[in-house]
């Protein structure tokens, strides 16, 4: 078996992996970024919504080529669709601002890594981790049919939601059924929607999740659904919910489907352990998706940056103790937020349509600029005092 040696091996060339490779290489390390697919960014398994807020932190300059649409805000619809809460892009969180062309976006991020000197291998899946004296020391990779051994002081697992690398390394990122949202999305053309907003539909139309329409411009949009696994009997049910929704919306029904995307997101708090001797987890592999929105691109990119930088600091001593600086940073950044959002997600999933309709009616009457936890609480107390107990812990 051919043997190669690097400081850092990054497994998976999504936003998490490319950013990890970029920052590790920038800090002087010899980096290999591997991707199992023959082309970065393809096939797209994403609704492609991002906010602008985090791009500066990871030094990504906005490029026209990877923006399909610019979005002013989000509209959230009550189950009966009688109430609509409109949020500005700033209020709406990590998914609202741009609708990307991820095919180009992911390639652009990989190019940034290459620019810093990271080497990239495509069509090269990691199939096994190499461990030496209990410490991760590289991986076996199938490269164009041939097995090769890549030795590295640090392995960064950026292999996405289905991550196997974490499991091979003995890190526990196992998800409970209720913390997995299974998704199906259609790229639709020739539909009529307000293209300045992303649209979210909640309630029994998408149990434990939501339905979305993310405009791509010129009558095209990503129309999808995420449903909590514990709320359905089999994953095929998600498609039935989506088809029913489209059937009931003439503005969508008249459109055509040009692409189908399936996938899943985690909706859990941040796992306790994200590093071990010689290994770090980033992005979806580290379960860093926001439990309410299901957005993970920003957190993947940011965690990748932190991992790349801290890998450089620890390269002469890549022990669990040294790499824990990364784990601590991730917990400080998202630990509390994701725990709170996980709790809110659990609560929202337990509310029936009638209660959600009332809640949305109240929120839709609060001035957008005034929307805050207290303002909502006060409005609920005034209009539906019987509900206040239900929402107290949530709000
Ligand atoms: C239907 C759907 C809609 C979504 N919509 C949004 C959205 O609108 N906004 C948002 O922010 N997030 C969204 N997400 C989540 C978002 O796509 C992820 O959070 C994001 O892609 C995570 O980036 P990552 O780099 O961690 O992983 P990924 O982007 O999944 O990249 C992992 C890479 O690793 C590669 N890989 C896997 N195993 C191996 C291996 N053994 N060897 C080599 N390579 C390997 C994969 O091929 C892949 O390229 C959505 C997810 C789904 C499923």
Image: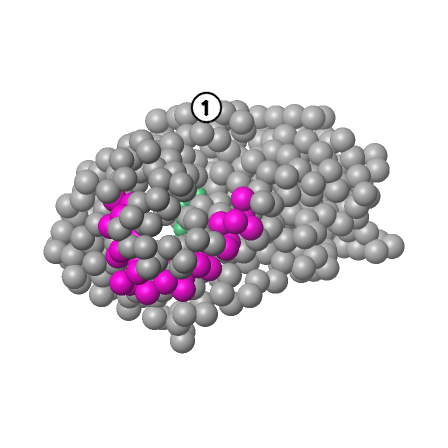
Q: Which residues are magenta?
A: 337-364
Query: Is residue 123 something that shows in the picture?
Result: no
- Determine which residue is flagged by label 1: 61
353, above or below 311, in the image: below
Residue 31 found in image quarter: top right
The one of 140 and 379 positioned closer to us in this rendering: 379
Q: Position of residue 266 (x, y in %)?
A: 51, 56
Residue 327 found in image quarter: top right
Q: Residue at x 51, y 67 (%)?
A: 177
Q: Position of residue 227 (x, y in %)?
A: 39, 62
- Majority SS type along the magenta span: helix
Q: Residue at x 24, y 35 (%)?
A: 196
Q: Position of residue 82 (x, y in %)?
A: 18, 53
Name the colouring of the figure.
one colour
The one of 79 and 170 positioned closer to us in this rendering: 79
Residue 116: in magenta span = no
Residue 350: in magenta span = yes
Residue 153 found in image quarter: top right
Asked whether, in this view, residue 200 is left or right of residue 174, the answer is left
Q: Residue furthest bottom?
A: 233
Q: Position of residue 344 (x, y in %)?
A: 46, 53
């Amino acid at each position: 078996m051919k043997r190669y040696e690097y400081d850092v091996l990054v497994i998976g060339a999504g936003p998490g992996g490319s950013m990890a490779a970029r920052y590790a290489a920038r800090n002087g390390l010899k980096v290999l970024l591997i991707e199992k697919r023959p082309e970065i960014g393809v096939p797209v398994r994403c609704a492609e919504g991002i906010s602008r807020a985090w791009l500066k932190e990871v030094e990504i300059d906005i490029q026209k080529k990877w923006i399909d649409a610019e979005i002013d805000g989000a509209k959230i619809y009550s189950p009966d669709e009688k109430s609509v809460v409109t949020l500005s892009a700033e209020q709406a969180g990590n998914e609202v601002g741009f609708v990307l062309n991820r095919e180009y976006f992911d390639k652009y991020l990989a190019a940034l890594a290459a620019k810093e000197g990271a080497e990239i291998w495509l069509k090269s899946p990691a199939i096994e981790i190499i461990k030496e004296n209990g410490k991760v020391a590289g991986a076996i990779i199938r490269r164009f049919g041939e097995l090769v051994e890549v030795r590295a002081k640090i392995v960064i697992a950026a292999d996405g939601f289905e991550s196997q690398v974490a499991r091979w390394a003995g890190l526990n990122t196992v998800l409970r059924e209720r913390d997995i949202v299974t998704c199906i999305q259609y790229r639709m053309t020739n539909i009529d929607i307000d293209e300045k907003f992303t649209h979210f539909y909640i309630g029994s139309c998408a149990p434990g999740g939501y339905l979305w329409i993310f405009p791509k411009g010129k009558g095209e949009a990503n129309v999808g659904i995420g449903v909590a696994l514990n709320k359905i009997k089999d994953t095929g049910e998600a498609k039935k919910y989506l088809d029913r929704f489209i059937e009931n919306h003439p503005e969508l029904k008249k459109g055509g489907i040009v692409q189908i995307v399936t996938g899943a997101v985690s909706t859990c708090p941040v796992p306790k352990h994200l590093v071990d001797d010689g290994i770090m987890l980033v992005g979806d592999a580290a379960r860093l998706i926001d439990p309410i929105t299901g957005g993970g691109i920003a957190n993947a990119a940011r965690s990748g940056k932190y991992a790349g930088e801290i890998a450089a600091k620890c390269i002469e001593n890549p022990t669990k103790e040294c790499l824990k600086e990364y784990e601590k940073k991730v917990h400080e950044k998202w630990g509390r937020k994701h725990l709170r959002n996980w709790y809110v997600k659990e609560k929202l999933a337990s509310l029936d349509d009638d209660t959600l309709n009332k809640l949305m009616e109240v929120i839709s009457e609060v001035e957008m600029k005034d929307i805050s936890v207290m303002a909502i609480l006060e409005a609920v107390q005034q209009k539906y005092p019987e509900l206040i107990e239900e929402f107290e812990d949530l709000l």
